Image (cartoon, helix red, strand yellow):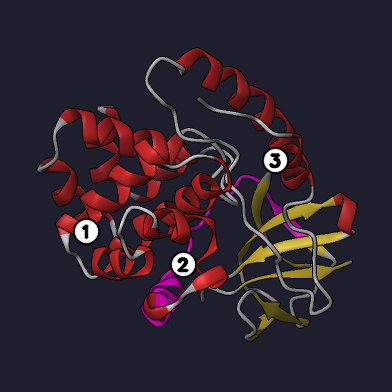
Amino acid sequence: MIVVRSEKTKKILHRFAMNSGNKIANRFCSFLPMKPGYLLASLAAFALLHSTANAFNECMATLKDPNGSIKVSCDGGTKATLKGGEHFLAERLPEANGWNVYLKSGCRGFIEKADLQLLPNEPLMKLNFDQEKKLWRKAQSTRGRDLGEAGTAFKGRGLNYFKILTAASNGDQKAMALFYSVCGREMDGAAAEDCFWRGWALFHVIGDETFAKFLSGQPAKVRKRIAEILSSGDQDPISNPKSYIKRHFPKSYRILFGK
């Protein structure tokens, strides 16, 4: 059964609260996995959360000063320079008086009081999650609390979360099927939030061509489960994942949604 907790709503409202290093502290999906018999309750919960999340709609942007530049502290401790003329995805954070920014290099960070030229009519760029693959590979030997909610949940089932993610990111179809199966059927709460977000990142790392081949060999019920994981809520920072998937993953989109 899906339980929408008050803390869940608070996390959505403040999901990008910044730490002292101005790095993104947390990333959360706004939908928990659907279980058989709870579709209507799930959709009602999603509608409430999605209306809240839409206050933070994303769009493409660039610096107003074509000769300017801004230093960005990226999620993960790295640094990047955002230069004038560079187009990037921006997400306004009124409560933090700044913007979450997503660069084509894969840097995800936060900037304060930046003078941006918003480009709402420009199609959203494809996100870059390549660095996640490196993090998963390093985390295969992680133990204890560092496993996180999903990692701990997988471990309780005798599975190594990050080992499965790493294998899946390398094109192992059995690992892909295992990851999305466990995420879609057996995770809830904070574990589902983490699992759904990494499932979104994994989708990007695998790429449309390979992912479509994987989907074509899966039973209809598995494809349905994956479609729910990838499109049933906000996939940070994308508030309309189906439209985004159709643009950047056309082969996978046709198999998942049939249009």
Asked if residue 62 lies left or right of residue 209, the reply is: right
Q: Residue at x 68, y 71 (%)?
A: 109
Query: What segment carries the magenta color?
Result: 117-139
The question of residue 136 being in magenta is answered with yes
Asked if residue 117 lies left or right of residue 27, the reply is: right
Give the numbered dot on residue 138.
none
Q: Quadrant of the C terminus?
A: top left
Whole-number angstrom distance, CA of label 2 to CA of label 3: 26 Å
- The residue tagged 1 is 175
Q: Position of residue 210 (x, y in %)?
A: 19, 58
Count neighbours of disc 1 (C-alpha within 10 A) and say few if under 14, some if 14 to 19, many if 20 or more: some
Whole-number angstrom distance, CA of label 2 to CA of label 1: 21 Å
Q: Position of residue 35 (x, y in %)?
A: 41, 26
Going by the picture, which residue comes out furthest to the left? 217
Q: Residue at x 61, y 66 (%)?
A: 87
- The residue tagged 2 is 128
**Which one is in front, 6 or 108?**
6
Task: Specify which label sits upstream in the sequence, 1 or 3.
Answer: 3
Circle 2: residue type: Asn
The question of residue 51 being in magenta is answered with no
**Which one is in front, 8 or 78?**
8
Can residue 242 be seen here? The reply is no
Circle 3: residue type: Lys
Q: Residue at x 59, y 40 (%)?
A: 239
Whether residues under marks 1 and 3 lie with C-beta atoms below 8 angstroms apart, the answer is no
- The residue tagged 3 is 8
